[in-house]
Amino acid sequence: MTPSRMQALIFDVDGTIADTERAHLAAFNHAFAEAGLDWRWDEAQYTQLLEISGGKERILHYWRATRGEMVDVSGTAVGETVQRLHDLKTAAYETMVNSGGVHLRPGVLELMEEARTRGLGLAIATTTSPVNIATLLRKAIGPHWRLSFSVIADASSAPVKKPDPQVYRQVLQAMKLRGRDCLAFEDSANGLRAATGAGIATVITPTHFTAHHDFGGALRVLPDLAGVTVNDLQDWSCNADARSGALA
């Protein structure tokens, strides 16, 4: 087997580029209070809800789990309510980010900058909303943050959420690359399954909310990306290719 040449790095957003989940949790609870609901998620409950990919999907799952199946006479009321709650949550999250309440995880920006100088492509593969991505990266990278990425695939382009590999397959198609020519960065088991389902070796940096997940099959599991270089990634990838070739 000919070793692959690493050509692009593909990043998840929430939990991977930044440890955003505490801010998201606070934003959900703010939205529920603003809407006059008596819902309040604690960390343990939210940790379980993170098994469901997508904010609107989490709201709907919780609603059904606590209130039973809803009879939607109009056919649109449930969807409209979930959308309103999610809009309120998104606005609250944006305020938190803009006030400096969310920061990039260690090593992320440095690795991205090195990858660009080494001629590697950068992409985003997330099932969060475009507005959440823009809010975070505009604050962290600057107003021209989009220029840092060759491809951005998100909830607007990939409606089937992780662990389905749809979003990663979209990125590969747009970049005209094979999975074996890229590395993915994720923080959760669902993200790992999505990336590896598209044939992409994956580096995991767990968060407080995902540390208990099963990361079997990951290329590496690290506390964060501090000190990680492109040469490290190339070595890990080549060693994995060599092991695969030996087993083939």
Image (cartoon, rainbow, N blue to C red):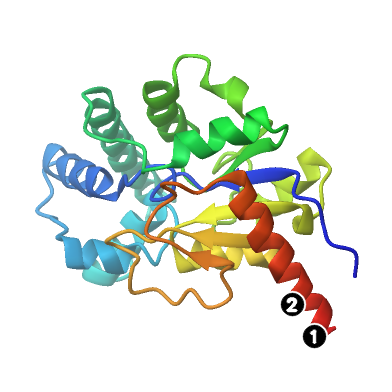
Q: Residue 43 in the image: x percent, y percent? A: 18, 61
Picture disc at residue 243: 2
Visible in this render: residue 175?
yes
Does dot 1 land on a helix, a strand or a loop?
helix
Query: For mark 1, what is the residue?
Result: 247
Do callouts 2 and 1 mark residues in contact (Cβ within 8 Å)?
yes
Does dot 2 land on a helix, a strand or a loop?
helix
- Residue at image x 67%, y 58%? 235
- Residue at image x 71%, y 37%? 120
Visible in this render: residue 199?
no
Q: Residue 67 in the image: x percent, y percent? A: 23, 67
The residue under label 2 is which amino acid type? Arg
The residue under label 1 is which amino acid type? Leu
Q: Residue 115 in the image: x percent, y percent? A: 63, 36
Q: How many marks?
A: 2
- Residue at image x 11%, y 43%? 33
Q: Residue furthest right?
A: 1
Q: Nearer the viewer, residue 66 or 47?
A: 47
